[in-house]
Amino acid sequence: MTYRHPLAYLLGYEGLALHRAYAGEFDAAFAETRLAEVREMIAAWDRGELGAGDEVGEIDTVTGYRSWSRTYDEPGNPLIAVEEPVVRQILAGLPTGRALDAACGTGRYAEMLAKAGHKVIGVDSSPDMLAIARSKVSAATFQLGELSRLPVADASIDLVVCGLALAHVAALEPVFAEFARVLRPGGRLVTSDIHWQSLYLGGIASAVDDNGVESRMPAGRFRPSDYIAAALPEALQVRGCHEPLWPPSPYAGGPFVRAWAAGAADAAYENTPAAVIWHLEKDARPSGEHGKMQNRSTRDRL
């Protein structure tokens, strides 16, 4: 269970903004405005105007996406608005072939890949999301499966795309091992996810069930070094890494934060990465050569 305190949430935003001011990003007037807001927030809490704290539990992704699938494709997801243009640009520069949309959800990238001429397989652990994907993308084949046990043959895929899903896994290593297994030598892997820094701005995915009960889905705080540590042992070489920033938005932080601390929210989001996007390539050298190169590199450093 996670305890959520409305005053603590607001003060967290103010704290981020004040730390940035202390680091020299904002002037004295900015800091004084934030401190005045803090005093008013505490007074509002004492008057009972901020609501009460609550506890929210965690659910697995199959259960969570069962309810979220009904609204997932509705426009307005700010993370997708930042992430998708970067992924699209990477995919547009790759040759067509046999593509896997891993954790395909409602088929957002499966649809894009099929239109570009790829032969597409979509895999997801949520039957509800898969049902929507099948109805949307008739040109692709969809299968139920887990990221750590993909129902795909060895070395049969030219391109793997995994969009906004890896934050849900317990560890990256077994998933990257599966990506490497199904990729042909020279195949490409493109992954995207919410940036770990944005999880602390309230970006943990949640779902509300039919009874109105909100629960959070798993959210791993994977740093760029964690991706590198998972990719390199599987002979996946980095071709690019992107950390696009949140754009200025009158909605940053959400309605509750905007009502009390809009300036602090704007400062917290400014120059903060929204997503982390990786473009990797499976080493095309014969099996064993990669290990020899790694050993040679290790000896050279000694």
Image: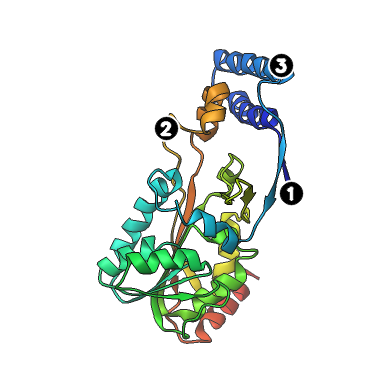
Q: Residue at x 61, y 30 (%)?
A: 13
Instruction: Report if the CB atoms under discs 1 and 2 are less than 8 Å apart.
Output: no
Q: Residue at x 47, y 82 (%)?
A: 152
Where residue 219 sits: x, y (%)? 62, 54
In the rendered image, which residue does mark 3 sit on? Answer: 47
Q: Quadrant of residue 217?
A: bottom right
- Mark 1 is on which residue type? Met
Q: Quadrant of residue 295?
A: bottom right
Instruction: Report if the CB atoms under discs 1 and 3 are less than 8 Å apart.
Output: no
Instruction: Report if the CB atoms under discs 3 and 2 are less than 8 Å apart.
Output: no
In the rendered image, which residue does mark 2 sit on? Answer: 248
Q: Quadrant of the C terminus?
A: bottom right
Query: Which mark is first along the chain, 3 or 1?
Result: 1
Query: Which mark is first along the chain, 2 or 1?
Result: 1
- Mark 3 is on which residue type? Arg
Q: Nearer the viewer, residue 275 or 11?
A: 11
**Other-residue count near label 1 (Cα within 10 Å), few / some / many at <14 / 14–19 / ≥20:** few
Label 1 sits on a secondary structure element that is loop
Camera-near label (1 vs 2) is 1
Label 2 sits on a secondary structure element that is loop
- Mark 2 is on which residue type? Pro
The circle on residue 1 is: 1
Where residue 47 sits: x, y (%)? 71, 16
Q: Is residue 238 visible?
A: no
Query: Which mark is first along the chain, 2 or 3?
Result: 3
Where residue 100 sits: x, y (%)? 41, 73
